[in-house]
Image (cartoon, rainbow, N blue to C red):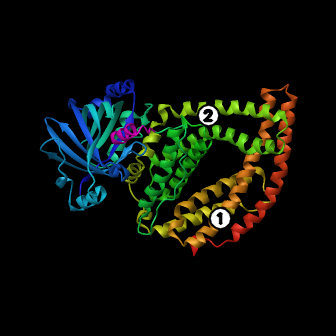
Amino acid sequence: MGQRELEIKLEVGSDILDRVRRKPVFAAMAAVKPSQTSLRSIYYDTPDYSLRNQRASLRLRAKGGGWLQTFKSGTGVVNGVSNPIETEVEVGGPSLELDRIGDAEQKEWFAKLVDAKPLDPVFETLIDRTIWLLDCDGEAVIELAVDDGTVEASGESEDISEIELELKSGPSRALLEATEKLFDGEPVDLATMSKAQRGYALLQKNKPDTASARPVNADKPALSTEMTPVDAIKTVGRSAANQILGNWALLGGSEDSEVPHQLRVGLRRLRTTLKLFSSLGDNAALERLSNEARELGRIVGAARDADVLIEDIVTPVMARDSADSRFQTLLLVLEQERATRRQAVREALAEGRWTWFKLNCTLFEQAVERALDTGLSADANADVAVFSARELDKAWKRVRKRGKGFDRQKVSERHAMRKSLKTLRYACDFLSPLFPQREAARFGKRLKKLQDIFGYLNDVAMAEELETFFAERYPDRDDLQESVDAIRKWHRKQAKAADKKAGKRWRNLRESPKFWAA
């Protein structure tokens, strides 16, 4: 079996790299002068791209007068991280030696994958590489490679410029720590494609288009009772981090209102994860991660609120009375406000102050390992189902406490309950695979129904803000004020009906069997 690589790929400008190289920490880590080399790599695949389709790659690389054959499985870059299994051997010349593809298991898998189909060159990369070996306080060695060159396929070419930091030895958290020290505060982007992915994209003229890419929705973390709570926080947190980073990457080029919404959901899921598993250890870095997720949620929320005003508050009323031209004027004003807020969010999220947060999401497992290095609590070795049942019960008790006197609650009290319900729902989504599925699904359905009503009632509160917004900006436009009044009255009526349903749904949820207590 080959070795598993762990590397992070960044896209940075030459000015940023120059600043990093001038930092004292870089000089301390890169005590040895860099080496430089030119690399020509030829990538092979079958006519139907069997290797690419199974996230594998096979290449020959000319290096130092010789040739290296490299086979990778589990290839591809996900939010800047590459973590494939790699087998690399020296070969006699520029031709494949498939009998040296790996161990017996890899050879069998490769043979089934290729299925006797021919393997031909599909594209090449020509790279000038500068390499520094970074000494991380004698604990780890990391290779920092700066690559500049081209990928060439079918007569087409595209420039490549990227930085890779690969863990060569030592604990995996050292990769996170070194990357933080060098790039914290610098406005960097996480790479979205490996060189092989760039080659295939060029070959097929099928480059990703962020304008049409779909928002990244939450997935259900694959928890099992064989895991420890430490395994669980890594799995659940990775799911939330992928949702955050995936939508973050789309935000700059997408006008889809679901992108900021799903980014905000991911941030809430991450905060819920860190809260659920906070008893495993006490570490300031994870607390900082949660605090920054809260602040990012506030920033992204400005754009999301503009989307809600248009799509959930104004548009339903327009659909009822589409002939009223005053609504069209009001909608135009709100569209302009949305564009302004969305651009402000893009600019804010491009700042270097968020690089630390992005790196800790990208290498979330390593962030957890570093946090727990300071000491584990007894909960870290608990049965994961027992641990999860206890955390779910705590989340439910917070909801139940917020729900006392439900029918007489003030707006502020309902808002606090809504947030507790949201935390409970995320916790149920994360942890329900550890419990009986029928009971979990029944409880989850009732929880969602109540939360949906609370979400609408919260949105309706924004309809009340429309009056202030237009009064401040357009004090002489009585026609717009009349439209705002019509919208507010319509939603007040809907809110009364929703509020009646909320009481019934709260009682249904309160009386439901708790699946984690079965």
Residue situated in front as seen by the camera: 293 or 377? 293
Residue situated in front as seen by the camera: 486 or 447? 486
Instruction: Tell me which corner region of the image, top left, top right, bottom left or bottom right, holds residue 405.
Output: bottom right
* Quadrant of the drawing holding the N terminus: bottom left
Return the disc, 2 or 1, that comes first in the chain's sequence. Answer: 2
**Start and end of the magenta stretch?**
195-207
In the displayed structure, 52 sits above or below 513; it is above
Q: Secondary structure beneath disc 1?
A: helix
In the displayed structure, 76 sits above or below 375; it is above
Q: Residue at x 41, y 48 (%)?
A: 367
Q: Which residue is mark 2?
A: 342
Is residue 412 at all visible to an observer of this figure? no
Instruction: Tell me which corner region of the image, top left, top right, bottom left or bottom right, holds residue 68.
Output: top left
Left or right, residue 465 beside residue 58: right
Instruction: Tell me which corner region of the image, top left, top right, bottom left or bottom right, holds residue 261.
Output: top right
Q: Position of residue 117 (x, y in %)?
A: 28, 53
Q: Which residue is mark 1?
A: 445
10 Å neighbourhood of mark 2: few (<14), some, or many (≥20)?
Answer: many
Q: Residue at x 60, y 72 (%)?
A: 439
Left or right, residue 197 beside residue 508: left
Q: Is residue 421 magenta?
A: no
